[in-house]
Image: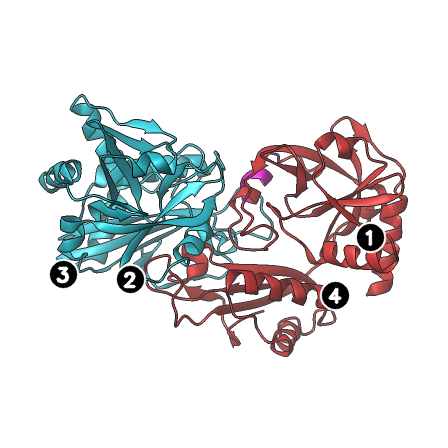
Chain colours: A red, B cyan
Amino acid sequence: MMLINGQRSDTISAADRGLAYGDGLFRTIELIAGQPRLWRWHYQRLAEDCRRLRLPCPDEALLLAELSACSAKLERAVAKVVITRGVGKRGYAMPGDAVSTRIVSAAAWGGYPASLAEDGVTVRVCELRLSQQPLLAGIKHLNRLENVLARSEWDDAAVFEGLLCDADGQVVEGTMSNVFYVRDGVLYTPALDRCGVAGALRAWVMEKASESGHAVSETRPALTELLDADEVFLCNSLIGVVPVAVMAQRRWADFPAARHWQRQLHAES
Amino acid sequence: MMLINGQRSDTISAADRGLAYGDGLFRTIELIAGQPRLWRWHYQRLAEDCRRLRLPCPDEALLLAELSACSAKLERAVAKVVITRGVGKRGYAMPGDAVSTRIVSAAAWGGYPASLAEDGVTVRVCELRLSQQPLLAGIKHLNRLENVLARSEWDDAAVFEGLLCDADGQVVEGTMSNVFYVRDGVLYTPALDRCGVAGALRAWVMEKASESGHAVSETRPALTELLDADEVFLCNSLIGVVPVAVMAQRRWADFPAARHWQRQLHAES
């Protein structure tokens, strides 16, 4: 079910700036019995992204009500929230009188096979290099052609994710996930101030790690730093925490950090 | 009037990848009595952009018929063609079975004041630096948040356009136009192999210059090269050829090259 500005609909104006320019942002959220998991982190990210793109952030209670309405009768659902700058006249200038478009939808979702989280996944290194734009870095905006092109580099179902580096060769993220790695017991994650998407689960891991006195270090790792790591794991709001078993020529068999965060995440929900 | 995949409509599916990811491209075209100006260059650019994004390019005769139908009874119209990868299931992977979405629309258009082309315009230098992505450079795709943010840097109606440099400080284009400059009788334009949009009118100027034995040189100019130029002009399919009268501290009063290309363009149509 889909609600567009609170009304049941599944179409938007073809003049919406979300289509014309990708002028908007989105979030993908898991719902259990109508309740969004990790909501606080999702809403914080949404509010921050809205602020940076100068979009009005929807009221929290309204969004929660719409998410619940869209997933009625679904025990487990995947929801998507899209906010655009709405319909505007021709031209890039932000219209002063635009009414933003709010799209909330949810569908039944079966989750991923448990083997991914249990046994780990195979990751390839993408050839596409992410461009660097500090003004957009971290935002889950609708300009996602780089992700589309990177994901089109492979169609081998055995490869779960593609690792993305920036033009300087530094690891940033996966095409649909954030990346953490462990070295000598310390947890690291790539800084996302030049490119990449700062996911809600990444924010949750960083907050929980900080609270436990082991703050995550944000770095600009070369690919070799990940290949030399004791452990690498991916995360996003749908896959949860997934260890990397194979990347390039490197294989990992033990995933103590991923197991720790999987347990923490299980306890969170 | 708007046609979506040939049918009268003004809405698209909210699940269209054009909205979700900006997974598509567009063109803006002037129509005179239903006939697109500079059509050969527009269609060449459209076909090239479709090839690079692996989108099916609409048949030329079909597009011409739809442009004409959309602008019936309009003496002068501005048309927009949008091609997206259509509705797909969740995820960045290009769906194998997607049917692309083709949006053709036109509206009456009064043009710009003649004084712009006659007296020249004021151009500011934007603070935003364009990111570099060779895989997308030149394509008129739907990921245009950089243009939106750059255009939001000013709201002084006396400033017609903003000049965009890349992260290396090299001039690339305007937020909605391409840039040419003249030095010692030679015409130059920034190379667009790292970022920027290669417009149809830019392609036309380059082809005509080449045919006359004075090929345009593609360069990576620093801002100072434009400020030191004998002349700078902007172009796109709607504004035509517009000389720059003021940029930063520099003023220009004579526009012989712009006048030449304005005459050529007038003769073309």
Residue A96 position within the rendered picture, expressed as x and y whole percent measured from the top left: 39, 70
Residue B5 position within the rendered picture, expressed as x and y whole percent measured from the top left: 35, 53
Q: Nearer the viewer, mark 3 or mark 4?
A: 4
Q: Nearer the viewer, mark 2 or mark 3?
A: 2
Q: Residues within 10 Å of mark 2 (few under 14, many from 20)?
A: few
Q: Which residue is mark 3?
A: B73
Report the Cα–Cα distance between label 2 and label 4: 46 Å
Q: Which residue is mark 2?
A: B157
Q: Which residue is mark 1?
A: A215
Q: Which residues are magenta?
A: A148-154
Please report, as a chain letter, where disc 1 is located: A
Question: Disc 1 marks which amino acid?
Answer: Ala
In the rendered image, residue A152 lying in the magenta stretch gets the answer yes
Please report, as a chain letter, where disc 2 is located: B
Question: Disc 3 marks which amino acid?
Answer: Lys
Question: Disc 2 marks which amino acid?
Answer: Ala
Q: Is residue A110 visible?
A: no
On the picture, is A260 further left or further right than A47? Answer: right
